[in-house]
Amino acid sequence: MTIRPFRIEDEAAVIELWTKCELTRPWNDPSKDIQRKLQVQPELFLVGEDEHGIIIASVMAGYEGHRGWLNYLAVHPAHQRRGHARTLLAEAERLLLERGCPKINLQVRSTNAAAAAFYHALGYDLDEVLSMGKRLVQDAPPVS
């Protein structure tokens, strides 16, 4: 797998990847998420390509001066269990560390035990915190 920064022409392929990996949700417009990321540290939005140039992986990283964050770590189901997620994660960690980032945070849905186990095996531990959020912009109608 070759890792490179996201390019605007990758949008459809990345959204398809996220959909196949079940990362999209009705209340988050993935196209808007991409457009927002391209306004803030676009060089930390990475994709992984196979030997044919097809996008098979992605990760969005960011650093706001206190903590690094990871979002949308995905590997196409047909390419999982080959070390691609580990490789992409290591590159995101390297780029964040290069910027002086002391700690990385990420969120895993409480129902996704496999993802939690993956991160735990790579040294990520459960922080005893309550994750809270407040939507400032409604991308889609609220799900009832």
Image (tube, rainbow, N blue to C red):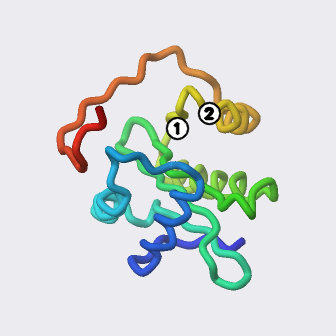
Quadrant of res 141:
top left
Residue to which mark 1 is pinned: 104
* Picture coordinates of residue 131, whole percent (x, y): 41, 23
Relative to 38, is 88 on the left or the right?
right
Q: Residue at x 70, y 36 (%)?
A: 114
- Tag on residue 10? none
Density class for disc 2 (Cα within 10 Å; few <14, some 14-19, many ≥20) is few
Question: Which circle, 1 or 2, is nearer the viewer?
Answer: 2
* Badge 1: residue crowd in 10 Å (few <14, some 14–19, many ≥20): some
Q: Nearer the viewer, residue 60 or 41?
A: 60
Q: Secondary structure at mark 2?
A: loop
Q: Nearer the viewer, residue 109 or 2?
A: 109
The three-letter code of the residue at mark 1 reads Ile
The residue that appears at 31% across and 29% down in the rendered structure is: 133
Who is closer to the viewer here, 101 or 134?
A: 134
Residue at the farthest right position? 82
Q: Secondary structure at mark 1?
A: strand
The residue under the point 64% across, 83% down is: 53
Q: Name the residue tied to disc 2.
A: 112
Q: Residue furthest front?
A: 144
Q: Are dots 1 and 2 in contact, CB under 8 Å?
A: no
Q: Where 116 sits versus 28, above or below?
A: above
Q: Position of residue 84 (x, y in %)?
A: 72, 59
- Quadrant containing the C terminus is top left
Tell me the quadrant of the picture where the N terminus can be found: bottom right
